[in-house]
Amino acid sequence: MSSRNYTRRDFIKAMGLGATALAVPGCTGSPQLRARNYRRPNIVLIMADDMGYSDIGCYGGEINTPNLNGLAANGLRFTQFYNTARCCPTRASLMTGLYQHQAGVGHMMDDKGYDSYRGDLSNNCVTIAEVLKQAGYSTYMSGKWHVTKHIKPEGPKHNWPRQRGYDRFYGTITGAGSFYDPTTLCRGNTYVTPENDPEYQPETYYYTDAISDNATRYVREHCEGSAAKPFFMYVAYTAAHWPMHALEKDITKYKGKYDEGYACYRERRLKRLRKMGLVSKDWAMSEQPGDWESVKHKEWESRCMEVYAAMVDNMDQGIGRIVAELKKQGIFDNTLILFLQDNGGCAEGMGRGENINDKWRSGVKDRKPMGKDELQPHIWPPMKTRDGRPVLGGPSV
């Protein structure tokens, strides 16, 4: 992959030249004729969740991400791109173009008593979907919302995607949860259950695939019914946020790959990043907390890394399906695709306690199976599966 360093000033200049070049073909004649010959681009904005800088292949990672690598090879890779340290503030800034405090989401989804920390997207701002919709774009979203504290099915829903500019929405209102049975899963403004949505059957369901499939459907159905209009589509994956949930077919690809531990992969990634020109050769490796030889549950840690890689791999497969649909519909060359992460890799350490399952088992008082029209209320244990079993995790499982 070729590499060239750009400053932000270079990028702005290049974008300006690009816009000029787009206007050149067929620019003779009246302004009305020029306007008819100019097609506004579609925009696909893709966000990953809690993923590290060097995880994907085009940033030095060993995880199999051929679709993202292909987009990067024919696009621009940023090295000085800034987001925030938490899920919600990044999403609030991304949706509004404001600093997160101006958007009312200075931290997470709890009201701290100040306008900058309401835990709810401010009504004094507009979202990118609202602006583009007014400009004639169709607007679609598939995935994680996480910019409102109001998550109950009865509402209020003034800050849900459909009320903030999106024509169609499939995804979760809250920020995390099971990939097999996610809480706050909605289609439009309606909570999804196995009863009201035949596509949602927890025995076979996987949220990352559902995000990708609904995004692909939006592209296809837009071209079938609204081809004359440009569209904006926000695809917000929950991969690779905890819990570590992946499909066995994807995990199998990485079986045994991480048995060597963390240190060797850190060194290999840094070497590749330097070779790609994405980090300075003068930058030293940061100190590693702990030592692999002293890790108590090596097999479990290795499994966690395998599952994490599988989650990212599956997301890349889904992005490949979206790109394939854009090409099938003949609109790929007129579509701007952006890929970013909401923050860096997760350091929260969820589910690592030695005796967590004792607490989780005792926390599930009702072991009755859930009904087909019953909502999954929890994002984290103590919680139960649809057939009434406690959800367990950690190194003792």
Image (tube, rainbow, N blue to C red):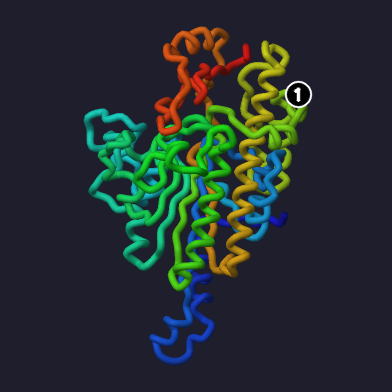
Quick one: quadrant of the C terminus? top right
Residue 95 appears at what percent x and percent y?
Answer: 38, 49
Residue 335 appears at what percent x and percent y?
Answer: 53, 64
Question: Which residue is located at x 50 percent, y 32 percent?
Answer: 181
Question: Which residue is located at x 34 percent, y 45 percent?
Answer: 189
Q: Which residue is mark 1?
A: 259
Image quarter of residue 107: top left
Residue sitting nearer the eye, 127 or 344: 127
Quick one: quadrant of the N terminus? bottom right
- Left or right: 52 in relation to 122: right
Against 338, residue 301 (above or below) is above
Q: Quick one: SS at disc 1?
A: loop
Question: Which residue is located at x 33 percent, y 38 percent?
Answer: 148
Residue 10 appears at what percent x and percent y?
Answer: 53, 61
Question: Which residue is located at x 23 percent, y 49 percent?
Answer: 124
Residue 82 appears at what percent x and percent y?
Answer: 47, 44
Task: Give the amino acid at mark 1.
Answer: Asp
Dot 1 crowding, Cα within 10 Å, few <14, some 14–19, many 20+: some
